[in-house]
Image (spheres, rainbow, N blue to C red):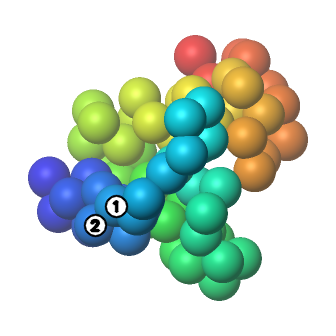
Amino acid sequence: MAFSDTYDCLTDVDRKFGEHELEPLNEETRKLAIDILKKGAKKRNRECQHKFGELYTEGIYLEKDVKKGN
């Protein structure tokens, strides 16, 4: 849970309608948030696996790869 909680804290910023949660972050914070998701996914944290998979499937700040996303 710590990985997904940390990600949620990093991305808990005011967003505009339709904006992805990573969009308002600066590049350094965005990379940190993605790295946290990746580490959490490797530790089999389901929330991190789901969110990290979405980034791959949708090609959000990662090269689009549906196979990896699933």
Q: Are marks 2 and 1 in contact (CB under 8 Å)?
A: yes
Q: Nearer the viewer, residue 15 or 7?
A: 15
Q: Residues within 10 Å of mark 2 (few under 14, many from 20)?
A: few
State the residue at coordinates (58%, 55%): 22
Q: Residues within 10 Å of mark 1 (few under 14, many from 20)?
A: few
- Expressed as whole percent of the image width and height from the top left, the position of residue 1 reads 14, 52
**Mark 2 is on which residue type?**
Cys
- Single out the residue that lies furthest toward the front: 16
Label 2: state its secondary structure: helix
Report the disc number at residue 12.
Answer: 1
Report the disc number at residue 9.
Answer: 2
State the residue at coordinates (71%, 76%): 27
Q: How many marks?
A: 2
- Considering only vertical position in the picture, is 44 above or below 36? above
- Expressed as whole percent of the image width and height from the top left, the position of residue 29 reads 56, 78
Q: Quadrant of residue 17?
A: top right
Which quadrant is the C terminus positioned in? top right
- Expressed as whole percent of the image width and height from the top left, the position of residue 49 reads 41, 35
State the residue at coordinates (85%, 41%): 63
- Expressed as whole percent of the image width and height from the top left, the position of residue 42 reads 41, 49
Real-space CA distance between mark 2 and mark 1, rounded to the nearest whole angstrom: 5 Å
Quick check: can you spot residue 32? yes
